[in-house]
Every structure is written in C-alpha cells, then in structure tokens.
Amino acid sequence: MNVLVINAGSSSLKFQLLDVDTREVYAKGNCERIGIDGSFVGYESIAVEGKQTIDAALPDHKTAMGYVIDIIDATGKDFIGIGHRVVQGGWYFPESKIVTDESLGWVREVAPLAPLHNYAEADAIEVCRELFPNKGNVVVADTSFHYAIPERAHRYALPRDVVDRLHIRKYGAHGTSHRYIWRATKQFLGDGVHKLVSCHLGSGASLCAIADGKNMDTTMGLTPLDGLIMGTRCGTIDPATVVYLQRVGGYTVDEVDTMMNKQSGLLAVSGISSDSRDIEQAADEGNEHAQMAIEMFAYRTAQLIMVMAQANEGIDTIAYSAGIGENSSRMRAEVAKKLAWMGVELDPELNAVRSDDIRLISTPKSAIKVLVVPTNEEYMIALDVAELLG
Ligand code: AMP
C-alpha cells in the first residue's frame, strides 16, 4: 500500500512516496527556497539513477507540488492517500485525522501557536486537495502523541483563566518521531522495554518519557523552545530572563524571540556553528567555547533524562535518534559518562559502529539498556494514513 507523505515548511516542501508494507521508498526529495531566489527541487527516485536537481522557479507551494506530481508520476506508482506532517495540532488532534473542511480549519485556528509552520502546512493541504480531488488527505500532528501527557505534567502553573483563554499547555513536538522510536524499540527488545526515555537529538532536540507506550512527559513545552539546548535555541532558561532582556536590555519582543530561537543554543555557546560536526572538530582543535558547548549539551541531556525517568517512575532503556543522536558517538559517550553514577555503561566498540539499523550500544552489565534507533517519521505518518484510508 503506497502513501505520499508531505512535510511543508514556509519555504520548503519535502515529499516521500513509500510502500507501508515493504517500507520501500519509491521517490523522495525536497523543494527548497520556495518564494525565494535560487529555488530548486532535489530528489531521488526509482525512475532515475542517482541524486537529481532541477533548477525550478518555485514562486509558491502549488508550483512546487506540480514538480512533485511529475516526479511521482514517473515512478509509475499510484498511492492511496497523502499524509501531511503538521507541527502544531493544538487541542484538535489528539490523534491523526482525515482532512475535511472542518479539520483543515482547525490547522489554521491553532496556527498562532506555530505561525511559521501551520499556515504553510494548511496551504499545502489545500493544494493537494485541489490537485488530487480523488485522494484522501490525513493530518499527522507532531503534537498528537503528547496530548495524552498527564495533567500534572502538561499544565502550566499560571492563572487558570489565562491558561484556558489562551490554550496554554505543554504541547511538545517530535511526537511522531518519539512514537516511532517507542514502536521500533518495542519490536527490537520485546518484553525488555517498559520504561523508555526517547532522545530525539537533532538541530531541534527533545526527550520523551514513555511507559509501556503511554506518553508521560516531554521536554518541549508550549513551543519547541523549551527543554534541551539545541542548534540555535536556548532551551530552558529562567522565564524572567525574557522580561529582563526587554526591561533592562532594551530588546524588543521580536528581537528576544529571534535571539532565543535563532541566535542561541550550540551556536551561541560555541560562537562557531549550530552544527555539532563543526563544534566537535573545533573542540578537538582545542577551542574552549566549542568544548563548553558539548559539555553543556551533554549535561542538560543527562539531567533531563533523569527528569524523564522520574516521569516514568523508572527507566530501563534510553534510545538515541536524529542527527546527533544517531551519528555522534562522542555526544552519546559524553552523556553516558554523566550517567555512570547510576550504572549506565556504553560498549565503546558498539558505540562507534555506524549503521542505519537499530542497535544496542550498552554493555551487558549496564543498569540501563542504551540503543540507537534511526527515526522514520515518514513511515509513521504513512502508517497512520494506511490505517485511516487503507
Ligand atoms: P537533524 O535535525 O536530525 O537533521 O540533525 C542535525 C544535527 O545532526 C546537526 O547538528 C548535525 O551536525 C548533527 N549531525 C549529523 N551527522 C553528524 C555526525 N556524524 N556527527 C555529529 N553530529 C552530526
């Protein structure tokens, strides 16, 4: 059963055509710089050999979808429906839902919580409905999996009337990835996993506490700014810092927003880059700021793994995923060093293995199993589409 998965950003549109039964990917790519000079479509497909790039004027998402249709057509594969990654589902998507006029309206209604993403995603859904009138569309929100988090963890201790009026709560993000990580870990370890801390460590990073499949807590909050230190986001800071920056520092609301989301995190601490590869290299060359960026990232990760363990009231497994989690053996080793006091022990040889497969990297005597679990959000989205439309 084939599904087309669409992940639209404000200036990009990623797509993937895959078979949910075999997991075979027939075509995948990204339309980049939509609405900006120098736009292009990069893709791979079973219809052509190697990576392809089309220099294409992409004034809007509709034009980009035209290229996607041509690429999909060339594979000769039909598909049952389209799954759309939506960043913010708000209170309307505790699970994935088929797109109707009403549910499309919900994607826009909650957009003030994620203005950079939801409007573009809603536009992309609309384009797909227009271009494929006979195909069903499904919203798979990144927040859905977190909607089941217990109230003690998702409620903010602000006045109830304010919280209710503005729909303030912990929504989290990366929910589709954490859901996939639980599923893959369960398939891999069987009865060996009950209390998992899932670590999605990419340029955006979050942890999720999952007990027997139930989501107990996550580190991102109302927005993806909370929790871990990320590529360019500061993660958790004293909330009064926001007021202080404005009142004493003289920064405007927008400047503080930009500072905390785009100019902070690994980039700010290292002063070099938001990319952990550059930082690791600089640290090796003796750059102290780069070394501190790694130290802070690992410290906060280890600390919040413990916070998630408390949410689970126990921990038997840690799973690493996404760009840093899957690829940086150094960062995994740094975090493990900090958790050694509670019996976490990595096997250095297993930790050094590079592979696209799920794998165990802890020693047999480690108190907690540590895995690397390559995430696959597109597959998870496709599974939801197959379930709802298949
Ligand atoms: P993502 O957002 O999941 O694509 O992850 C991006 C992050 O993964 C960036 O900080 C990259 O530097 C990091 N990353 C990717 N490959 C490696 C690697 N081999 N070693 C260290 N970090 C990596």
Image: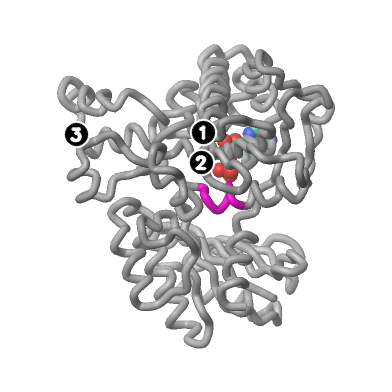
How far apart in space, not on screen, are marks 1 and 3 (Cα)? Answer: 36 Å
Residue 73 drawn at (x, y percent): 64, 81
Q: Please state which of residues 363 and 24 is positioned toward the viewer in this rendering.
A: 363
Q: Residues within 10 Å of mark 3 (few under 14, many from 20)?
A: few
Quadrant assignment for ligand 1: top right
The part of the chain drawn in magenta is 174-179
Q: Quadrant of residue 347?
A: top right
Residue 150 drawn at (x, y percent): 44, 43
Q: Is residue 251 magenta?
A: no
Q: Please state which of residues 15 and 244 is positioned toward the viewer in this rendering.
A: 244
Q: Residue 311: which numbered mark, if any?
A: 1
Q: Please state which of residues 334 and 38 is positioned toward the viewer in this rendering.
A: 334
Q: Which residue is mark 2?
A: 216
Three-letter amino acid code of the residue under disc 3:
Thr
| Ligand 1 within 8 Å of the CB at mark 3 | no
Residue mark closest to the camera, 1 vs 3: 1
How far apart in space, not on screen, are marks 2 and 1 (Cα)? Answer: 6 Å
Q: How many marks?
A: 3
Q: Which residue is mark 3?
A: 252
Does residue 236 appear to the left or right of 384 in the view shown? left
Q: Is residue 175 magenta?
A: yes
